[in-house]
Image (cartoon, grey):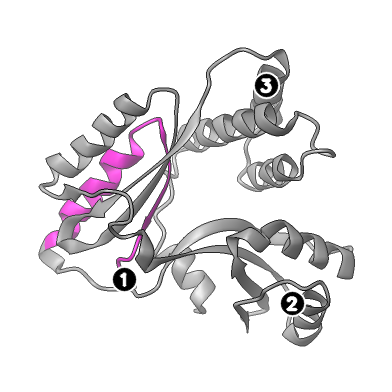
Amino acid sequence: MGRAYQNKKESMAKTSDMKAKIYSRFSREIYVCAKAGGADPDGNLALRGLIDRAKRSQVPAHVIDKALDKAKAGGGEDFSTARYEGFGPGGCMVLIDCLTDNPNRTFGDVRQCFTKTKTKIGTQGTVSHMFDHSAIVMFKGDDEEPVLEALLMADVDVTDIECEGGNITVFAPHTEFFKMTQALKEAMPDIVFDVDEIQFIPQNLAPIPESEMEQFERFLSLLNSLDDVQNIYHNVELPE
């Protein structure tokens, strides 16, 4: 299992796998993205990528269309991003990304998750410096050399590239996301991304005591139950 798989499976706890939560998360993100940059995917590359990811997550077309129609109509909620960080059970480091129309409410709800598990929410910068904000793409392939050449020709600042298990995974700074994806699409018109996301990747993984695992799982469950929480990132090395 390569680093890409390890970080995706073990080091990043996304929102709940429940379909309703996934649909809600994508619906909100699509609405915010379309409202900010326009509801036409051809003219809003961020929106196009977001819709592609929603489809890969099997979000129904009517959910996507409803979010786009809501953005086109104007009005509606004004969501803003919010990021919280702190130390969870076992002293693990945690980042929580939210979209909220009421920051005070969201902060209170997130803080309660820390309080209920006897852990501590921190201020900005408490743990974020221990995560890399990275753009990641993964696609089928078995030769990274032409991929790396195409990216370097496009002046993409590649930080790492892996070829393992029939998949190529490329890491770059988050600011390089669109340049990286466009360069790959131009070099390989038939490319299909299995992953094309911006994530926070822990610089180091750390196990937590077995006695804290139940509390850690409860902590994630509490966070996942909040509508405003979009993504959760942590540095816990989970057992195989």
Image disc number at residue 19: none
Q: Residues within 10 Å of mark 2 (few under 14, many from 20)?
A: some
Q: Quadrant of residue 174?
A: bottom right
Residue at position x 71%, y 13% in the image: 73
- 36 or 224: nearer the eye? 36
- Of marks 2 and 3, the one in the foreground: 3
- Counting from the top left corner in percent of width and height, residue 28 is at 55, 30
Q: Residue at x 21, y 55 (%)?
A: 88
Q: Which mark is residue 141?
A: 2
> Which residue position holds label 3?
71
What kind of residue is marked 1?
Glu
**Residues in magenta?**
212-237
- Image quadrant holding the C terminus, namely bottom left
Label 3 amino acid? Ala
Query: Mark 3 and 1 residues: CB-CB less than 8 Å, in contact?
Result: no
Could you say where residue 183 lies in the image, as x and y percent from the top left? 81, 66
Label 1, on which residue?
Answer: 237
Give the mark, 1 or 2, whose residue is nearer the N terminus. 2
Q: Does the stretch in magenta take in 225?
A: yes
Query: Which type of secondary structure does the marked residue at label 1 adopt?
Result: loop
Quadrant position of residue 222: top left
Which element is circle 2 on? loop
